[in-house]
Image (cartoon, rainbow, N blue to C red):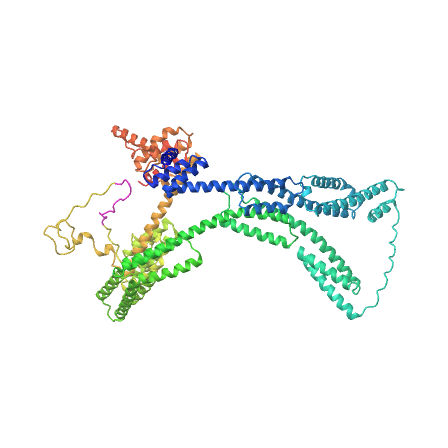
Amino acid sequence: MTSTPSKSQDTQALDALTGGAFSAPTSGERAARVREWLAGNPDAEQIQQVFQELSVRDRGAAKPLREKLDEIKRARGQEAIAAEWAAKAETLLALQRLNIADAMAWQRDAAKAGAPLSREPLASLKTRLAERVRGIEDLQHRVQVQREAAVLLAQRIEVLSTKPWQDALAQLGVLQADVAHWQEQAAGLAGDANWASVDGKFPPLLENSKAQLLVVWEAFQGALEQARVASEDVAAPLPPVQIWADALRLARGETLEPPAASEPRPARPAVDPAQREQAEQRVAEALRRVQQEVTEGHGKASAAAATALRNAFKEHGRLIGEKLEAEVHAALASAGELEGWQRWRADQLREELVIKAEGLLKRPEGHSLGGRKMQETLRQMREQWKQTDQGGPANHGLWRRFDEACNAAHKVVEAWLDKRKAEATEHRAQRQALLDELKAWGAAHAASTDWKDLSRGLHQFENRWREAGHLGEKAFAELQAQWKQALQEAGAGLEQAKQASVQRRQALIEEAKALGAAAQLRIDAVKALQQRWQAEAQSVPLERKFEQKLWDAFRKPIDEAFQRKTEEREKAAAALSAVDRAVLDAARALQAANATGDAQQIKASMAALEAATRGQAAAVAAAAAAAAPAEAPAAAAPAEAAPVEAAAPAEAAPAAEGAETVEEAAPAPVPAPAPRKPVVAVRGDDRPGARRPEPAAARGGRFGDRDRDGGRGRPGDKRFDPRRDERGPRSERGPRLGDAAFRAQREALESAQAALRKLAAQAHGEVLTNLLGAWEKRAADQVPSAQELGHGVTPAVRGQWVQSIGGPAGDADAAREALLRMEIAAEAPTPADQLAARRMLQLQLLTRRGDPSPAQTWAQDAAKVLASPYDQATARRVQNVLKVLLKR
């Protein structure tokens, strides 16, 4: 009985500790209060007590407590493991001689044991071990470099010993500095803190290289000093270098002793010719392989080939000739040199690749490589490393650095691949949802006969499928087959309707062929057939190209029938009159003049065409032909013919042909036509700002009444119309033209008017450009003339502009109001920053009733603007304004 109050008191204390986790009414509230309490990082013992009490009441609310306890347990276990591996790492770092394999095995074994390498202190220990290993590998690599450098220095010394001793003496200082620098670097390697940890084969290599270099260097120095002393003292002994000794003998005036005859080599024992031929064949084959590998620069292959050649020479050297033996020795020497050079060059290439790999992740922001580019770069670099390994022996230290850098950079590729994988999963889900949507849509529209709506819906589904995102080839092929099947099922009714529509259109094509082949073309039947085709085309849509193909087949027989009818009509009107021929020739001449772009020639050709249309060209040609034999004066021609001939001499030949026909038909001279009455009706002025014409007064009559030449109409409608004889005779307007001549005349005149408008616009733009250029250069002599500026600019106005441009530039503020007045006069837009000023000016103009309007003073305002300094923005505004004002 005494335990119950104690337990209740403990629960109340824990409830107060956890902020009401035990007294909360719902499980969710209890879990929320537990999480809030855990956010304060309570002790593990308190968490354990709360968990023991709460797990009995609510396991769901106690779940965060259990997870927290498990986390604390794992953390304690990892702390113990971290302490154990930290001690091992400290032991390795304390060793004077560190084994690279043991250092690398520590990281591998620690990771397998579950040690937290990413947290302290293991993270810093791992970094220290990696730096120690990198330093040891770098030291070993530097030993190899020093060894190669010693070989190169020895080769330089040997090369200098083959040149004159004066050249060797000149290079002594540089060579001495290089040898001293090499010795200093070698001493620095031996004094490095990691020297005791390098592989045991590297210290002897460095010592041997040092000993060999010093022997060669001391011998070279002694021989060179002896040569220098011998050059100063005749009694001094000559150096042991033969070429230097010979040069000193010649300098002393001594004669060179002929070389002592070499002792004859002992004769070789007689060899069976068959054995010699077989031995030379094997040695020659190995020799060719060495020479080929040396020529191509293959380091590893040349070394293997050289080894095979040595073995062949040891076995068959006593059987081959002297010439082949010399070639073998030369090839072996070349292979040895190539092997050393290849090793040095391969290490250089490897270092470049290592630097490039380590710099992949050190690029500045904005220049980092993307996932795909990084993947391609790493693949290329690894391929280059493989090719480098083929040209020389491997370098394990550089390979570790290169591999670590590539693995670090490959994390970018892994993140990119994960992203692509997630995107592919998302795209697959989208396509699957679209596939299900298509199936549902097809089932819902299975009974629909609105073929256009069905076709539109299927096209929308196809576009959405096309834009649904990228997938792999295998996944896309799988979904593509399902999509095609669903699309075919959804459009089954539409496909049947299309097939039926195609059959109906084929029947219409046959009917069109029958109509086109008929002797008499029935226009009403053609229109009815075309209406049936249009109704069919609007009811069932087909694929665009196929539908166009059917339409071409449908209209072809009808077009051919109309073409035959046109040809028959043209054959009937083939015999053109003289006026028609003259009009056609004048129309061709006008088209040719349009192509030239000459305004004067176009206007002259238009005048000639107008004269030919009135029949004057034929009359002029006939009069000229009649007056030519009698040598009649030129004044006998009609009054209207002279300007035509003077303006367009190119039309004289066609007109002459027409004149001959007229002479044959009617040799009598044609009287000059009476002058026509001026045209009263004019074309409306549609330019900006022009005054609109007054609308014509409505006349009496009903819709459909005949015109003023007709018979019907209300009484009094025609009492004010001029009589037929007052409108002039038919001869004044010219003879009636044929269809071909009329169409040619109309097309030529339309083309000419368009060409004149284009030339006028070009001339107007050039004038504006020249005016603005003169303003910019302040060159008054470059201002266009008054004729070029147009009828709106008088010579006095041009003089003001010339004076404004020629004078010094004035104040720009004074020209702002003038430019605003010009924009108001031209009804041109104003920049946004000047709209307030323009509105204020317009309000001021409303109060100035006696002042002239901007439309009247724009020329003076332009002079004020041109007197101001040139500005690009102001020039654009002036150009937009003058473009309108100069045309008025």
Above-or-below relation of 764 to 552: above
**Image coords of residue 632 (percent x, y):** 33, 56
Foreground: 20 or 149? 20
Span shown in magenta: 677-690
Residue that appears at 25% across and 45% down: 684
Q: Quadrant of residue 650?
A: bottom left
Front residue (pair 616, 586): 586
Q: In what quadrant of the picture does the N terminus appear?
A: top left
Q: In percent of the image, x 61 and y 45: which residue is there?
A: 103
678 in the magenta segment: yes
Q: Magenta segment: does it hold 144?
A: no
Q: Residue furthest right?
A: 235
Vertical relation: 213 (above or below) 507:
above
Residue 642 visible in the snapshot: no
Vertical comparison of 619 with 370: above or below: below
Q: Residue furthest left?
A: 715
Q: Main secondary structure of the magenta part?
A: loop
Using the image as rendered, state which of residue 577 and residue 631 is in the foreground: 577
